[in-house]
Image: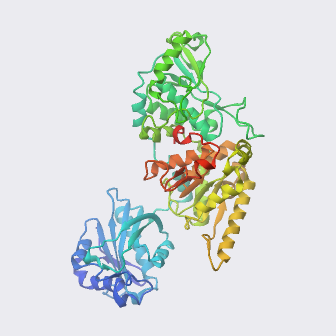
Amino acid sequence: MSDPTAQQTPSLSIREATPSDLPSLQPLVQKAYRGDASRKGWTTEADLVAGQRIDAPGLLSKINAPLGAVLLAFPAGSDEPVACCEVVCRDDSRQVAYFGLFAVDPERQGGGLGKIVLQKAEQYVKDTWGAARMEMTVIWIREELIAWYERRGYSRTGEKRPFPYGEPENGLPLRDDLYFDVLVKDLQRPTDANFITQAAAVEFPSPIDYAPIQQACGRNGGFRDGLLFTCEGQHGGVGMVRNQVLKCVRYAMHAGAAIVVPSMSKRNPKDISDIETIYEAPLEYLFDRNAFVKHLTAACPGMHIYDTKDEFPHYSDRDPHNLTLVGDQFEPNHPPEGIQHPREWRQFFDGWLDGQGVQVSREKPVHVRIDQAFLEYPVQDDGRAFANEYGKILSFRHETRDLAARVLLEMRNKFNLQIDPSRPINPDTYYGAHLRLEKDAVEAWTPEDGWRFSNMKDQFQEQFTNLARFPGLNVVYVASGNLTIVELFRQELARRVEVDSSSIDSPGPYKGRKITVVTKHDLLPDKTVIDSLPFDQQALVDFLVMFRASAFMGVAHSSFPWNVALRRHELSSYESIANEGTDLLRDELSVIMGKRSDYHHIDPFATGLWP
């Protein structure tokens, strides 16, 4: 513990309690929490719990705790405490502290004493243990007290902890439905510059773990000289291009081949539905090339990676055959869930090479071009750990990560959201809505052909219904390539809020809520930067912001929301993806809206898309 020398304020001194303070400490706590005396203050739990708040042995153990302290507050010139609290270092890293046993003399409440004690407690845990976060628990029904803490920067995590029924030394509950809500506060709110640095550096939802990839890479039978794979012209939206690149690399692992850094086709800027163009773009058009090479080299040390095919040893002496194949070429009639024998792919491939009349050798290399197939690889075949980590070999472009961090910063500052840039997801901050109603989507999946959610009203309705489940999320971040659609969404949501708020007899779910709809264009100070980016690079910013939303929803006929929801699912307490309702994917973090009957068909994103 620190030196118990009193810390001074103009009217209050605060010091650590010692065992000799017990006679005055216990009555203070009892008076603040229990009985009619507590009703003189502005908040009490007298109607919830009777009996004693804590017994003398319990108080003594808190005073003597090796990584804890009870802080006492005294009016200037007095030796009688008027407030107290407990602080405890909660984890081995000393990053998290706990605040509890908060008591202010009921006759002195409302004068700012509680605020001073809380501030001193926060400073104490930072100075003593270097704590970065403060945690507390409050009985769920004490909304006025929770609101007081929220005004001082605390936020509900969504975690609930049981009330200590059957422990009379801590009180006699008067209700059978009590539990604690957990609240937290970041004690080291970073500067704007540090916020951007931290947020841009986060690999969602955690840094890559190479071990599962190394294990899979090591069971391929070995890499061989003279075999080169290329993955050129991958096309589609960000989610599909990302998955195509990952598949191509996975097939190269199976084959024991070297690869050339993959490339892609640029979308037609004049017609975003035209994704198969002749305009080739390098990997860094969407992804961080250096990070890709670094991660893949570490994850699969035997695989050689080249910038161009001409760098491959003896490439000019290669076998003259122009060899091209697709990933499911050896199992063309596979079920929708993907090829059934992925671990035999190398055996099939070697047999196919023999059938082409070519032999792999260092002096006469073989070049195989992998063409694009569709969601044919069963991504869970290598195990959940591999599936969770493998996609992290592809990080998005640095400038888009920086822009996403700036979007988060603007939301934090503009709406006073408790966004910790070092955390993958912050509770009670913002809602993420992906609206897939752009020109290419509406033309490809028409309502007349059975695609219910290509109807704007139906897609909006699902989002509004889901948003109503989260009364604490009043900032809605929308991702869409059509800003007219966003404006219609904003107007309809505002209309519903107005209708619910004006209804007296049957108030709806939006009554009294002040909801703001925003996009990256609304939030970024310099709009010329985001506006200068092509369609798919702008989408990267939305990807990164949606990853970190407190709640997220999208449609099932787009790879974007599936990518987001499956990546977020790594943080879910559920193993499977459909757990909290009839939607195609629904966990505590994300929803892919609707049932199978709401779609003409469902592409196998759930089984064929790496998170």
User: Taking 271 as reference, is 469 above or below it?
Assistant: below
Residue under the image location 28 percent in, 65 percent down: 67
Residue placed most toward the observer, 80 or 171: 171
User: Taking 290 as reference, is 452 above or below it?
Assistant: below
Asked whether residue 480 is in view, the answer is no
The picture places residue 351, in percent across and down from the top left corner, at 49, 15
* Quadrant housing the N terminus: bottom left
Side of 449 where 328 appears, left or right: left
Residue under the image location 54 percent in, 57 percent down: 551
Picture quadrant of residue 491: bottom right
Residue under the image location 45 percent in, 21 percent down: 223
The picture places residue 402, in percent across and down from the top left corner, at 59, 49
Picture quadrant of residue 193: bottom right
The picture places residue 533, in percent across and down from the top left corner, at 70, 44
The picture places residue 57, in percent across and down from the top left corner, at 21, 76
Picture quadrant of residue 218: top left
User: Taking 465 as reference, is 270 above or below it?
Assistant: above
Residue placed most toward the observer, 126 or 9: 126
Asked whether residue 485 is in view, the answer is yes
Residue farthest right in this picture: 270
Residue placed most toward the observer, 333 or 350: 333
Q: How did the renderer colour the structure?
A: rainbow
Side of 376 where 179 appears, left or right: left
Count of number-bearing discs: 0
